[in-house]
Amino acid sequence: MPAAPPQADLMTERASIIDWQDVPAAAWDELARAAGTANPFYTREAVKACVALPEAQRPQVLLVWQGEMLAGALPIAIKRVRGLALCVENWDQRVRALGEPLVRPGAEAAFWRAALPELARRPGQYLRLSALDPDSAASQALFNILREQGRPYYHTRDYARAVLHAGRSSAEHAAEHVRGKVLKEHRRLRARLADRGALVFDRLSRGDAVDPWIDALFSLEQTGWKGREGVAATADSATEHCFRAILRAAHADGTLDFHRMSVGGQPIAMLTNLECGDEAFQLKIAYDEAWASFSPGVLIEMEYLAYALDRRGLRRVDSCARAGHPMIDRIWPERRRIVSLAVPFDNAFSRLLCLGQDRWRARRVDRSATIQGIAA
């Protein structure tokens, strides 16, 4: 029997914060693959792509080392209001759907014990951690340490989004979660599409050129509501560069999962996912609104359901969608909870500031509930 690995929180850790470009590339890449909670939005290539976004600050990265091994990493930035440092926060921009740190399994407590004092030395009045999974090992370790130290923390946002879990076949999933009448309608729509031309669902192969697929995806997105509202990937050159770089990098390292639905050789829906081991994260979906009456977005998601559960055997797929999404919530009934936190530093001013903000948020919620009650 192999010897048990040493307990991570009994080893000596050292924490540092450096510019993202100075992080050793090989160590960052290896940690991203080994992390206990997968997060494709904090990989080196994702950060490299997203720094081009106009709202993105230049990030630094909190590193926690155990000997020569990188045990954890978290991109961070300083949020400023009128030039004053308000808080230290995990790095955020429009592409990021998850803010979990990259931490090796078993090193979660050691990571936070080393990280919290280092973060407290940065400019800012408190620590803001957004888009965390409260059930992850890293989050649970953080909560335990804060409780041990008698330090409060406050939820600033709490919602749940659609997620797909393994454990059943796609047929079993559909029978359990999608009404028979709806499944019958899906079959009817597919038959109608097949009458217009060959209905083909295919997937980008590792050896195929990715740029033509990216161009087709961006074209579909631009013709829809995202194009009309100016939030498509091609809305500006920085956003297009960011998404193109993410997709190219993922294709190069074999983590891009790119699906296409065509009728008579014409793409009418496309779906991209970023895979991390046995997990996947949906990055973009687009369809041609000229075919909207055929529900191409739903049909490609149902086809992907069969791929993810029956052929790929993924453990979890995160929709990365907003709460209450009108389409994906209907076919993926399971949820992943996402929270954002305000964590005071260990001093009186920081505690009072976070407590005051929490009470102000509570009053806003109460006022909103009262107004809604009157309107009803």
Image: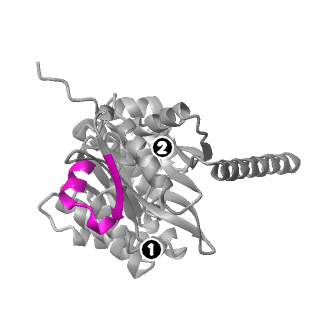
Q: Is residue 61 visible?
A: yes
- At x 46%, y 48%, the residue is 117
- Residue furthest top as drawn: 1
- At x 45%, y 68%, the residue is 290
Report the amino acid beneath label 2: Ala
Mark 1 lies on residue = 223
Q: Position of residue 226 (x, y in %)?
A: 49, 69
In the picture, measured across the screen, residue 34 lies left or right of residue 166, that is left
Image quadrant in which you'd find residue 44: bottom left
Q: Earlier in the sequence, mark 2 or mark 1?
A: 2
Closer to the camera in the image, 348 or 132: 348
Describe the element under mark 2 as helix, strand or loop.
Answer: strand
Describe the element under mark 1 as helix, strand or loop.
Answer: helix
Q: Position of residue 48 (x, y in %)?
A: 31, 68
Report the disc number at residue 162.
2
Q: CA distance from mark 2 to mark 1?
A: 26 Å
Closer to the camera in the image, 136 or 350: 350
Quarter that holds the N terminus: top left
- At x 35%, y 71%, the residue is 242
Report the amino acid beneath label 1: Thr
Disc nearest the viewer among 2 and 1: 2
Instruction: Give the magenta-colored segment's residue range.
Output: 14-32
